[in-house]
Amino acid sequence: MAVDPDNLIQGPATLYRGAFGAAEPADSALNSTPAASAWSDVGGTTDGVKLVIENTYGELEVDQIVDRVGSRLTKRNTSVETNMAEVTLGNLAYALNGGTTASGSGYQTYEPNDSSSATQPAYSAVLFDGWAPDLLRRRVIVRKVLSTDSIEVAYTKDKQTVLKVKLQAHYVSQSIRTYKIIDGVTP
């Protein structure tokens, strides 16, 4: 197979957050900015935006054959990972799955959500626009996410402060898949 340079991808993605169940842009609107009423741009990121899909397979075996006879998908973990470069209180609230932000004359505050573990967490959705082959656009929509890792906000002399975020995808329903990827194609 010959290498097709048009299939090589490089470049940043723009990350948006929305509420769980937010209206998704039409597939045909791939080259348009998502509606501001449903999706908010998180601003700059560092080290890219990663879609991570981890599949776990169980082995099928029989006594009579030494090789693996087959495999079955038993688990899938899908996540979106990034470093939010804009360390705003709004982005901090998103990274911590909610909380309360408020502002007054000359200040803004954040207080974390302290609901009991028996209540449902504040799921959200994430969408990012990047590049596809042939210099066209790719949109990834992950429909139900929750920030699941620890959040660190490091202030150091020689490094930029960022919010490192891992947004873990969750099952939506029998008829709605966890994520969707849309690529532009040349007509």
Image (spheres, rainbow, N blue to C red):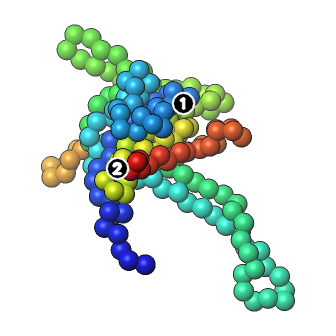
Q: Which residue corresponds to mark 2?
A: 136
| Front residue of 144 and 10 | 10
Q: Residue 176, image x and y in percent?
A: 64, 38
Q: Residue furthest front?
A: 187
Identify residue type, mark 2: Leu
**Mark 1 → mark 2, Cα distance in angstroms:** 27 Å
Q: Residue at x 53, y 57 (%)?
A: 53
Q: Is residue 108 above or below residue 166?
A: above
Q: Residue at x 43, y 78 (%)?
A: 1
Identify residue type, mark 1: Phe
| Front residue of 40 and 10 | 10
Q: In the image, 46: left or right of 62? A: left
- Pair 1/2: label in front: 2
Q: Is residue 178 above or below residue 98?
A: below
Q: Residue at x 44, y 24 (%)?
A: 38
Report how many numbered discs are placed on residues in the image. Answer: 2
Mark 1 or mark 2: name the one nearer the start of the chain. Answer: 1
Graded by Cα atoms within 10 Å as few (under 14), some (14 to 19) or many (20 or more), the crowding at tag 2 reads some
Graded by Cα atoms within 10 Å as few (under 14), some (14 to 19) or many (20 or more), the crowding at tag 1 reads some
Where residue 85 sits, quadrant-wise, is top left
Observer able to see residue 111 = no
Q: Residue furthest left?
A: 157
Q: In the image, 21: left or right of 94? A: right
Q: Which residue corresponds to mark 1?
A: 20
